[in-house]
């Protein structure tokens, strides 16, 4: 990772725009609002915001990332009794109430929100631990500051306990299944926590999660959406990048990426999954970025660059990057249903900006590595 790559590579001005948007939408206490122009997203999701923090780390905005991680630690401290109680109830075999589980999102003050939104969703906790470990590595000391240790320990304990428990998926739609991409997030978080804490027990639990994915979630040569659905889902790309549950060259990862490209592409973008109807089931820049990241990881620089260029072409004249595109053309009826319910979809999504910056850096690093390799070949020749 090189913090200069994204800033000095192609789409330089758009990367600067994305960084500005992310920083301008960070609350003074460290929280990142998911979308400033879509009232349903006026919260801080651990999933979205942890990718935002990682993107900022990649461009050298370490202070903003550190402020976010401190905010998360404080938010976790506030819900510590609920997290600990949930683990105790699980171990005692007592009934769990999903609405009382630790939230996937907080208000900007760092407080849990009591409403009818899907609540029990653990992927964000894994993504936060992964993002924090990446931040510690970039920051340079390699050491987790003492004030964050309790939150990391508690989160790792919570993830270890609920790793294989049905919960809401990353799209917050199915709350009764075990979701493969969620397991990838959990795996990445547990591996990160094991490194941060030097805990072999947590590392062993991560290996158990990995084993379950390889044993149960693999049929017909590719990975599946969940224990209840054999659909392909673009979030399955995360199994290899960035969470490393499988190597990008694993045959199932390769086949999954092929089917995502073949079955989920629409107008050059990437949809979430085949039966998606949210705002007409449009295409999401975050998923183009995920596919581009995967392509680069297997050495297909051209395909990765093509995904980056597609995202760059979808900034509007005001420098905004929306959550999704094309749903009004793919399924006009479903699009209109969601517009009637919630209004037009988000025109500005911080997660979209974050993934654009991340992919820009990934592509730039790959280009620099290729240039170095060519230079070394000429020198040795």
Image (spheres, rainbow, N blue to C red):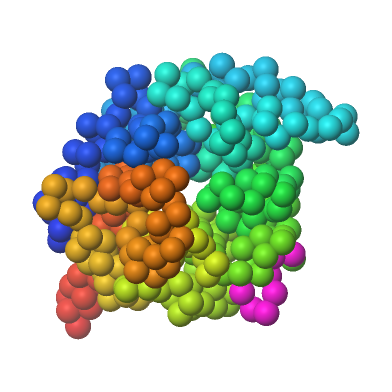
**Residue 329 screen position, x and y as percent:** 34, 69
Residue 205 appears in view: no
Please state which of residues 283 and 180 is positioned toward the viewer in this rendering. Answer: 283
State left or right for residue 54 relative to residue 119: left
Residue found at x 44% / y 75%:
261
**Residue 29 screen position, x and y as percent:** 35, 19
Please state which of residues 96 and 331 is positioned toward the viewer in this rendering. Answer: 331
Please state which of residues 265 and 306 is positioned toward the viewer in this rendering. Answer: 265
State left or right for residue 168 relative to residue 161: left
Please state which of residues 139 and 241 is positioned toward the viewer in this rendering. Answer: 241
- 17 is higher (above) or lower (below) than 110: below
**Residue 83 screen position, x and y as percent:** 67, 25
The quadrant where residue 226 appears: bottom right
**Residue 250 screen position, x and y as percent:** 56, 73
Confirm whether the magenta stretch covers residue 218: yes
- 376 is higher (above) or lower (below) than 317: below
Residue positioned most to the right: 93
- 169 is higher (above) or lower (below) than 261: above
Give, as a single range, the part of the protein colored magenta: 216-223
Residue found at x 22% / y 32%:
24
State left or right for residue 280 relative to residue 214: left
């Amino acid at each position: 990772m090189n913090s200069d790559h994204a800033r000095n590579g192609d789409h330089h001005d758009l990367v600067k725009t994305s960084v500005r948007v992310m920083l301008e939408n960070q609350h003074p206490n460290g929280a990142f609002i998911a979308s400033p122009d879509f009232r349903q997203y006026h919260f801080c999701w651990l999933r979205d915001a942890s990718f935002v923090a990682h993107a900022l780390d990649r461009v050298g905005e370490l202070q903003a990332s550190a402020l976010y991680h401190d905010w998360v630690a404080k938010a976790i401290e506030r819900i510590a009794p609920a997290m600990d109680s949930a683990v105790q109830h699980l171990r005692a075999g007592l009934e769990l109430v999903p609405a009382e589980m630790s939230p996937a999102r907080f208000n900007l003050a760092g407080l849990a929100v009591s409403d009818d939104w899907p609540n029990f969703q653990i992927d964000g906790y894994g993504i936060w631990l992964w993002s924090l470990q990446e931040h510690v590595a970039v920051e340079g000391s390699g050491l987790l500051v003492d004030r964050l240790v309790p939150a990391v320990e508690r989160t790792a304990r919570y993830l270890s306990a609920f790793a294989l428990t049905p919960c809401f998926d990353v799209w917050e739609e199915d709350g009764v299944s075990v979701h493969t991409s969620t397991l990838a997030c959990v795996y990445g978080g547990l591996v990160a926590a094991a490194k941060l804490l030097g805990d072999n027990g947590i590392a062993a639990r991560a290996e158990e999660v990995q084993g379950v994915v390889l044993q149960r979630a693999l049929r017909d040569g590719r990975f599946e959406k969940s224990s209840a659905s054999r659909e392909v889902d673009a979030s399955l790309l995360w199994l290899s990048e960035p969470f490393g549950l499988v190597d990008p060259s694993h045959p199932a990862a390769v086949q999954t990426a092929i089917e995502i490209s073949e079955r989920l592409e629409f107008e050059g973008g990437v949809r979430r999954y085949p039966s998606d109807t949210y705002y007409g089931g449009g295409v999401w820049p975050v998923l183009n970025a995920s596919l581009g990241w995967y392509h680069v990881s297997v050495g297909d620089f051209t395909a990765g660059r093509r995904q980056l260029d597609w995202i760059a072409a979808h900034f509007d004249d005001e420098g905004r990057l929306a959550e999704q595109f094309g749903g009004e053309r793919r399924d006009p009826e479903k699009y209109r249903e969601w517009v009637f319910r919630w209004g037009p979809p988000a025109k500005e999504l911080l997660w979209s900006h974050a993934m654009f910056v991340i992919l820009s850096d990934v592509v730039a690093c790959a280009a620099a590595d290729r240039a170095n390799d060519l230079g070394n070949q000429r020198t040795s020749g």
